[in-house]
């Protein structure tokens, strides 16, 4: 008979628990030093069917016992493991997670090939550890065939981009969402299946990866799935993007949308450039080509993809030193003070021409690659002169961090980017209105870069950035961009000052 836990376990009961577990903290498996007090806690809480028996009690070190707060020990243990996984990067998908879990020994395999035999009304899946038959359903709108079934992780993978194909997975995993769903599924059922498709005898999931991740952390190895057999990938991808964007209750991150759309658009762009039946090729012509290729896209959606392609070309360039500081979510953080939305309304809005060009892309007049190079050079200067000193662990009283936080607040960077553009245009003798709309759409030489860097240095050395805490500037940068820009000029941060005039 199991020993029932009383309000306070006695010394004999503590010895039983320590004999079972050793002086090992259940939270993450580290040894508890001799002389340090051992705490004892429920692995699973009463509210989550945790039994009031010694089998449900484990030792903890004092640090982790305090750190877990009101979480049951089992949940806290998973939280620590999740934190360890998310330390691997900020663009992690279900594929990264199942790779992580396989290395940790939690699962034996994933993503293995499966024999698929499609009959008139049924489909049979066969694998060395799994075999089952499912009824085939037909979509009344598209005629696509699909089936529902409980499938093991051994034959599932995430539909990510790889060398063989463009993946349909549009999201990255979010720590809070995975952990909240992990706790939710301890009590409640999964209402909707994960969705995937068959590709080269493999089954790839592109929707429901947070559910799948949460289920895995709960120890389950099978998933309720809806799997398409042979869909039109372009249309399926568009449906998936729409489902996660304009029709979603929670819109997915603008950075993810830009990466996803930019990647797909880039592949279409390469196809267009390689077409031999088109004599003159330009960006405007490409959008017309895209309209013919995919009539489901509206003009606004095509333009949105074009801008995403331009942003993606700059923000994902490996030489861009700001890349690690750009958040993959819609919010900045101590570690990543910039967001895609912030940059698209400031630096990119002022220095990147986002309208499709009529210039023949195989002529000397076409300068899009030069523009990309120049914008990346500007961002690298911003890093070298300012954000290379960004310290996410700095105390609130740190003067340099306070200065950088002011410079790179959302409204601030939007306001000073316009002043910087005007100053740089003047320094580079760009005065025509049409040319000012495309300030970096040209070849620049070292002397031009030196002028740009000098303007940035003046901007970042403006004395008001270093004002004491709770100064007038802190109120100003919390307001609108227009009002802030006027305040900047009133206090001496003008185009002339950025160009070198005294305050």
Image (spheres, grey):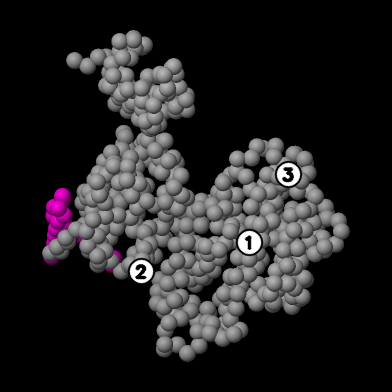
Say which label, 2 or 1, has the lower sequence index: 2
Residue drawn at 69 percent across, 77 percent down? 434
Quick check: marks 2 and 1 in contact, CB under 8 Å? no
Question: Where is residue 300 drawn, in percent x and y?
Answer: 51, 69
Residue assigned mark 2: 234
Residue 192 visible in this rendered orientation of the protein: no
> Do the residues bearing badges 1 and 3 touch, measured as CB atoms within 8 Å?
no
Give the foreground label among 2 and 1.
Answer: 1
Label 2 packing within 10 angstroms: few (<14), some (14-19), many (20+): few
User: Which residue is under mark 3?
Assistant: 474
| Magenta residue span | 120-142
Q: Secondary structure at mark 3?
A: helix
For disc 1, the marked residue is 379
Q: Residues within 10 Å of mark 3 (few under 14, many from 20)?
A: some
For image coordinates 73% across by 44% down, the residue present is: 474
Q: Quadrant of the C terminus?
A: bottom right
Q: Earlier in the sequence, mark 1 or mark 3?
A: 1
Q: Secondary structure at mark 2?
A: helix
Q: Residue 353 appears at what percent x and percent y?
A: 61, 71
């Amino acid at each position: 008979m199991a020993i029932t836990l009383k309000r306070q376990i006695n010394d004999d009961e503590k010895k039983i628990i320590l004999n079972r577990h050793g002086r090992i903290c259940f939270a993450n498996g580290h040894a508890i030093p001799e002389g340090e007090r051992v705490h004892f806690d429920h692995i699973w809480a009463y509210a989550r069917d945790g039994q009031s028996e010694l089998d449900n009690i484990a030792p903890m070190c004092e640090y982790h016992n305090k750190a877990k707060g009101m979480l049951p020990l089992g949940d806290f243990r998973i939280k620590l493991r999740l934190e360890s996984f998310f330390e691997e990067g900020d663009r992690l998908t279900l594929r990264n997670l199942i790779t992580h879990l396989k290395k940790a020994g939690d699962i034996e395999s994933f993503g293995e090939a499966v024999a698929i035999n499609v009959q008139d009304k049924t489909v049979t899946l066969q694998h060395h550890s799994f075999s089952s038959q499912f009824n085939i359903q037909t979509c009344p709108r598209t005629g696509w065939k699909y089936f529902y079934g409980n499938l093991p992780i051994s034959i599932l993978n995430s539909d990510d981009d790889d060398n063989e194909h463009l993946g349909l997975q549009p999201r990255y995993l979010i720590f809070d969402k995975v952990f909240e769903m992990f706790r939710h599924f301890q009590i409640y059922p999964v209402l909707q299946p994960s969705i995937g498709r068959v590709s080269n005898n493999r089954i790839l999931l592109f929707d429901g990866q947070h559910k799948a991740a949460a289920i895995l952390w709960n120890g389950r190895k099978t998933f309720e799935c809806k799997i398409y057999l042979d869909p039109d990938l372009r249309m399926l991808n568009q449906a998936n993007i729409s489902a996660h964007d304009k029709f979603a209750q929670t819109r997915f991150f603008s950075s993810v949308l830009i990466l996803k759309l930019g990647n797909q658009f880039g592949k279409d762009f390469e196809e267009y450039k390689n077409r031999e039946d088109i004599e003159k090729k330009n960006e405007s012509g490409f959008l017309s080509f895209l309209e013919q290729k995919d009539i489901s896209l509206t003009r606004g959606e095509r333009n949105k993809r074009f801008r995403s392609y331009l942003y993606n070309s700059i923000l994902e360039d490996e030489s861009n030193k700001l890349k690690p500081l750009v958040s993959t979510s819609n919010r900045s953080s101590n570690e990543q003070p910039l967001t895609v939305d912030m940059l698209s309304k400031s630096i990119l809005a002022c220095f990147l021409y986002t309208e499709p060009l009529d210039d023949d892309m195989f002529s000397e007049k076409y300068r899009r690659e030069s523009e990309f190079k120049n914008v990346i050079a500007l961002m690298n200067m911003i890093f070298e002169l300012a954000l290379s000193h960004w310290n996410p662990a700095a105390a609130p009283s740190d003067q340099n961090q306070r200065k950088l936080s002011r410079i790179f607040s959302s409204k601030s960077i939007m306001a000073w980017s316009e002043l910087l553009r005007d100053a740089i245009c003047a320094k580079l003798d760009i005065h025509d209105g049409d040319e000012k709309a495309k300030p970096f759409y040209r070849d620049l030489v070292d002397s031009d870069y030196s002028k740009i860097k000098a303007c940035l240095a003046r901007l970042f050395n403006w004395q008001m950035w270093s004002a004491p805490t709770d100064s007038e500037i802190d109120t100003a940068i919390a307001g609108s961009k227009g009002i802030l820009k006027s305040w900047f000029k009133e206090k001496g941060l003008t185009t002339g000052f950025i160009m070198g005039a005294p305050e």
